[in-house]
Image (cartoon, rainbow, N blue to C red):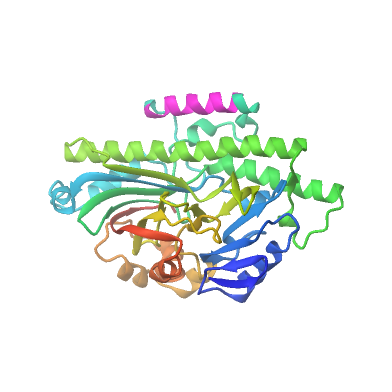
């Protein structure tokens, strides 16, 4: 850990000056207490740095939560070994990949055509939650119910992986989809308008914050919490569909021997350094002592099942993934489909140039990130992919 300033602590050994400067700027906001913690996977973000942990007193910065509210991971360890699993697929895993791709809508703007039976209870739970929070998510997305159980695009994925003991895991990454994005974008705009009305001076308009005790703050908290719940249940719904496809093609009921579902873009009320704060993890997971978590690498590399060490200086947090080194546009200009194929040797995936910007070389090396995080988490399992599903 590097003490950059009195208000900024940094765990990233790979970081560019622009990202570091953005974090310094954010850390100097008067609402930050006691300091901003920069995770090993930190990279430039909208307003606040991706891979940063921001404790705030009496206020929340909507852009410091991010536009994919509640984005995170879910993993299930099954009873299968790699050998017993592959025995069900003598011609390879393509049939399973295509079954998952048919069951879970992929890519931006792609949703379910109708409400699935498996989703009805979860939708009912979200409807009741919205009523308890006093708002109608339909004002943001009229089809929000059809979004439950959909993956999205970019770095969102569904994977089947194998750990160091040859056990098979089901693993996926997604968030609150279009409805969460619209909720976040709306409140970022509300915060900017509030800052202008109150003549709050900001170094970046995307660092605009909402102040506790105002109607704007209360409305954001209510809708934020609903979106975080949506994201959690969205992952549960997709995992249920993946499990259904595995059961259908193997003829065996999946036994969930271990299950973890965690956010990495979210805000919670927490107690740090003697005060209650609003803790926003923008690309970071909770890593309190004994807390289980998931840290995925990029496609074609390793992912990790971890447990938190409870590092107080890091605000009980850890990285959420590898962290980009190349922007998507730069990655497309730099890397080739042949390089992507080389990186994905031995992994069942859809061979398309649409995934070039997700090539492992576009990200920080995950082993370096994990080395930087050695005092934040303990690695319990190291996973390597055998199947990958992504949206364009």
Query: Quarter of the image containing the C terminus?
Result: bottom left
Vertical position of residue 237 compared to residue 328: above or below:
above
Residue 82 covered by magenta stretch: no
Q: In this rendering, would 258 be left or right of 215? A: left
**Does residue 35 appear in this view?**
yes
Q: Looking at the image, which is closer to me, 351 or 86? A: 86
- Residue 273 lies, in percent from the top left, at 62, 54
List the single residue furthest toward the front: 274
Is residue 125 a member of the stretch shown in magenta? Answer: yes
- Nearer to us in this view, 118 or 221: 221
Specify whether 367 is left or right of 24: left
Main SS of residues in magenta: helix
Point 56% across, 53% down: residue: 281
Q: How many marks?
A: 0
Tell me which corner region of the image, top left, top right, bottom left or bottom right, holds residue 304.
bottom left
Write the start and end of the magenta stretch as one range.
Answer: 118-131
Residue 199 placement, left or right of 20: right
Image location of residue 157, percent across then percent down:
40, 52
Residue 237 occupies quadrant: top left
Q: Which residue is pictured at 53% across the width and 45% down the height?
A: 70
Residue 126 vertical position relative to residue 6 in the rendered view, above or below: above
Quadrant in the picture for residue 9? bottom right
Residue at x 59%, y 46% (from the top left corner) = 270
State left or right for residue 258 relative to residue 319: left
């Amino acid at each position: 850990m590097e003490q950059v300033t009195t208000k900024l602590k940094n765990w990233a050994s790979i970081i560019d000056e622009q990202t570091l400067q953005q974090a310094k700027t954010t850390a100097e906001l008067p609402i930050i207490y006691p300091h901003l913690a920069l995770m090993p996977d930190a990279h430039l973000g909208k307003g606040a740095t991706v891979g940063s942990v921001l404790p705030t007193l009496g206020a929340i910065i909507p852009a410091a939560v991010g536009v994919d509210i509640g984005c995170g991971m879910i993993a299930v360890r099954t009873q299968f070994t790699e050998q017993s699993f592959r025995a069900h697929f003598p011609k390879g895993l393509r049939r399973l990949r295509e079954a998952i791709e048919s069951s879970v809508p992929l890519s931006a703007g792609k949703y379910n055509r109708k409400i699935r039976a498996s989703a009805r209870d979860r939708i009912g739970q979200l409807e009741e939650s919205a009523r308890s929070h006093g708002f109608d998510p339909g004002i943001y997305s009229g089809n929000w119910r059809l979004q439950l159980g959909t993956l999205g695009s970019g770095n969102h994925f569904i994977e089947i992986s194998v750990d160091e003991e040859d056990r098979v895991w089901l693993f996926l990454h997604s968030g609150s989809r279009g409805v969460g994005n619209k909720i976040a974008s709306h409140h970022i705009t509300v915060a900017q308008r509030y800052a202008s009305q109150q003549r709050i001076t900001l170094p970046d308009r995307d660092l605009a914050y909402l102040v506790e005790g105002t109607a704007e703050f209360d409305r954001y908290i209510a809708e934020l919490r609903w979106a975080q719940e949506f994201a959690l249940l969205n992952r549960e719904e997709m995992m249920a569909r993946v499990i259904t496809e595995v059961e259908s093609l193997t003829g065996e009921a999946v036994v969930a021997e271990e299950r973890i579902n965690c956010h990495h873009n979210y805000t919670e009320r927490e107690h740090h350094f003697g005060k209650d704060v609003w803790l926003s993890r923008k690309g970071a997971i909770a890593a309190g002592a004994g807390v289980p978590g998931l840290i995925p690498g990029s496609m074609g590399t390793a992912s990790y099942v971890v447990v938190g060490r409870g590092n107080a200086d890091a605000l009980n947090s850890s990285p959420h993934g590898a962290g980009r080194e190349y922007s998507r546009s730069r990655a497309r200009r730099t890397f080739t489909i042949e390089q992507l194929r080389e990186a994905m040797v031995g992994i069942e995936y859809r061979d398309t140039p649409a995934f070039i910007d997700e090539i492992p070389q576009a990200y920080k090396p995950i082993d370096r990130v994990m080395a930087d995080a050695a005092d934040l988490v303990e690695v319990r399992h190291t996973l390597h992919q055998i199947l990958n599903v992504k949206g364009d």
